[in-house]
Image (tube, rainbow, N blue to C red):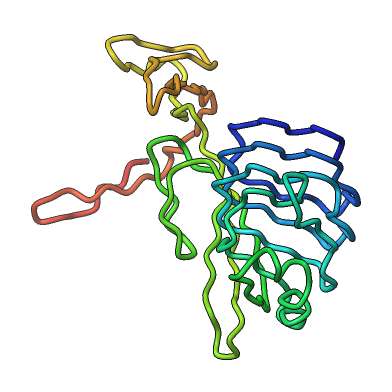
Amino acid sequence: IGIHAFNRCRTITGVIIPNSVTVINNDAFWNCTNLLSVIIPNSISSLNANAVFTYCTRLTSIINMNTIPQAITTLGNSATFYDVPSNVNVYVPCSSLSAYQNSSWGNKFNNIKGFSSDTIISAHINIGNTYTLNGFNVDSTGLYINAIQNSFGCYDLKILNLHVDMNRILNVTICEGDCFTINGVSYNQPGNYIIDSFTINNNICKTILNLSINSSINEVNNDNISVLVYPNPKTIRQH
């Protein structure tokens, strides 16, 4: 990740760094003031570049997959996590908990916890809906962490990467020759139509109709049809 790559990207709330990344350079996430959660892969062997997460003042959770504590700088405003609260939840492999607590990580953070399992869940919902599975209850795009302490004192992590589709999609299929009517407008041709626009949390959203036509005709063989007639049902057989 290059120098100043996400500098002042204040729309970022969560970051999952992939294993393909091996280096994070100076000021990569400097002043991302709405960043809440970050996952650091075990491919990152060092975090001692200057001010990588400086001024990420709302950071609440860090998950570090590396079993060996990376070196971080802790002095001055060039520190890796300068101005990040010291009580952030830092989750590290359970077998490495004491190593982190006795490293430069322990000098910076006072809430380091061990985890024994992690599950990343990627999910999509439409705007106006709520994701309620796996112990979550959220309705906004973001990275969410559910940490449950197990009987061994470590934590089992469920990590939800949730994307909210800002458009409402109506998938409708009609028979050939029919039409679908909504908001006083009728549609009888296949395609995508914008039905209306609305605003939620200052986001402009749309309702989109995805209309398809079922042109197949099921042939009925009426050479031998049985019909039940009520009351006193009897079978009338048509030949």
Vertical arrangement, residue 225 with respect to residue 208, above or below:
below
Q: Which sits in the foreground, 120 or 100?
A: 100
Please report the residue visible at 47 percent of the width from the left and 29 percent of the height from the top.
169
For residue 141, above or below residue 9: below
Q: Residue 14 versus residue 122: which sits nearer the camera?
A: 14
Judge from the rendering whether residue 237 lies leftward or rightward of residue 172; answer left or right. left
Residue at x 72% of width, y 44% of height: 77
In-front residue for pair 123/194:
123
What quarter of the picture does the N terminus occupy? top right
Picture layout, residue 210 above or below residue 43: above
Residue 230 picture location, percent across and down: 12, 50
Question: Which residue is located at x 17 percent, y 48 percent?
Answer: 229
Which residue sits at x=8%, y=52%? 231
* Residue in front for this viewpoint, 195 or 49: 49
Specify whether 205 is left or right of 5.
left
| Quadrant placement of the C terminus | top left
- Name which quarter of the figure residue 179 lies in: top left
Taking the image as shown, residue 76 lies to the left or right of residue 205, namely right
Residue 128, x across and y down, in percent: 38, 37
**Outermost bottom residue:** 152
> How many numbered marks are there?
0
x then y, percent, for residue 146: 52, 65
State the image coordinates of residue 87 (x, y, percent, origin top left): 55, 63
